[in-house]
Every structure is written in C-alpha cells, then in structure tokens.
Amino acid sequence: MRWLLLCTLCVLTLFGFIFWDIYTKGISALSWEFLLSAPRKGMTEGGIMPAIVGTVYVTLITALFAVPFGVATAIYLNEYAHDTRSTRLIRAAIRNLAGIPSIIYGLFGLAIFVEGFGFGPSLLASGLTLGLLTLPYVVATSEEALRNVPLQYREGALALGATHWQSIRSVVLPSAIPGIVTGSLLGLSRAAGETAPILFTGVAFYQRYLPVSVRDEFMALPYHLFILSTQHHAIQEVRPLAYGAALVLLSLVLALNLMAFFLRAHYRRHII
C-alpha cells in the first residue's frame, strides 16, 4: 500500500511540475484576443480561435462515431455473445487495436476515408479516423462497466417478465452508465490531443476562417502547437504563443477528465 501511495505521489508531483512550467510560461499569452481571434502575420500575432473550434468540431465527430458503435459492441460482447473462440478473438483484436501507434491510424484514415471514400482532407475524415482510434477504448471500458453490473439485476428483471433487451435497456445500462461515460470521455480527451491521425486526414497549417462544412479543412490545437514549437520560421518569437496554446489544450483535456469524474459521481448518487 505504501508503494502504491509513493508511486501515486511521484506521478502527481511530475504532473505538477509539467503543469506549473506550462502555466507560468503560457499565462502571459492568454487574453480574450488570443482566445477569440484568428492568427495573423504568419501566426506571429493574433489568436487561436480557429484551432479551438476545429478541435471541438473534430472531437464531436469522434464522439458521434465512437461512442454509439463502441457501446453497441460492448453490449453485444457482454450480453449476447457466447464465450467462443470467435468472441475471444474479437476481444483480443480490440485489445491489440488499443495499442497500435496513432500514426498508423492516420495512414489508415488517409487510405480509407480521404482516398477510398473520397472525403478528401476534411473534418469528417479526421473525425472518423480519431473515432477508429477511440473505439477500442470505448468498447473495453463499456464492456467492463457492463460486466460489473451484478447478475442479480438481470435475473430480477427477467423474473418480472422483461425481455432480454428490456432488462439491458432499463436495468443494466443505467447501472453501467457511470463507467461508460467515464471511459468514453477519457477516450475522447486522448483523441482531442492527438496530432498524427489528423496530420494526414484534414488538419490545415494555417486558416483564418472557421470550417462551415464537415468537408472543409480545419485547424486544431495539437497540430497548431506542433507547428509553433518545431516548424515555425521564428520559433523564439512565437514561443509564448506556443505555451499559451499548450495551456489551452491542457485545460480542455483536463476539463473533459473533470467532466468524466463529476458525471460518474452524479450517476452513482442517482443510482444509489
């Protein structure tokens, strides 16, 4: 127990140092103009509004694709599928997909969505690619949440005359909602910070205007931060802007994690 506590303190201390470094170097760049305006003069001035909006849009598309399919897959595997060789193979494939490097998903999205389906570099292609990246996490966490629902809940519903699907919809899913919501939001928070998958599928180096269609290219905070930190012609000049963008991105990811925590607590109190 002491070793676990020590490891936890080490991780929290390391995170605290990283966050403090980003905060102290990026807080000076934050302003309403920085948050609500487009970049100007080769991204040496202005703000990150298009990158924030693009990140939100692509994350929403990811959620619309990954969450319904992931939860449906988890329901099938846990509630309907028998413990056969095929089912075990599917579960093993899902675990392996969760460990594939994100750049592989980017190349796959380029081949399938950009070229194969003809979506071109766009919000839609990037969102679907990130959806594939997030899908294994949603499936795994949702199945674990369903597995933790006591068997007596199902048996009680069936004893009262409910069908299998009615027992899942009315009894099992509400009890598993805290775990499903938490796993989904944590998966989406990871997707919001990914650079490699969107690099090949639709993110733009520089764009002054917001996307108006899912077929448009877009800016995103992770790629914008990558450009400012490594590829810009005046790296030292834009360093404060890079730290400011990093602070905004970190804040968005932390907000998703806190949302997962509070929603889990809310649903637990509601169920109990």
Image (spheres, helix red, strand yellow):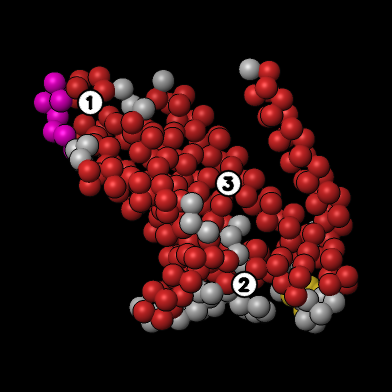
- The x and y percentages for residue 149 are 33, 26
Percent across and percent down for residue 134 are 46, 54
**Residue 76 in view, yes or no:** no
Query: What residue is disc 3 on?
Result: 256
* Circle 1 SS class: helix
Residue 192 against residue 139 in the figure, above or below = below
Q: Residue at x 45, y 47 (%)?
A: 137
Task: Identify which residue is drawn at 27% across, 29% down.
Answer: 171
- Quadrant (top left/top right/bottom left/bottom right) for the N terminus: top right
The label on residue 98 is none
Q: Position of residue 161 (x, y in %)?
A: 11, 26
Residue 272 located left or right of residue 260: left
Residue ID at (62%, 72%): 219
256 or 104: nearer the eye? 104
Give the mark, 1 or 3, whose residue is nearer the N terminus: 1
N-term mark: 1 or 2: 1
Q: Secondary structure at mark 3?
A: helix
Residue receiving disc 1: 154
Q: Measured along the vertical axis of the image, is residue 124 above or below residue 259?
A: below
The magenta span reads 158-165
Question: Residue at the left extreme?
Answer: 161
Mark pair 1, 2: CA separation: 47 Å
Numbered circle sitting on residue 219: 2
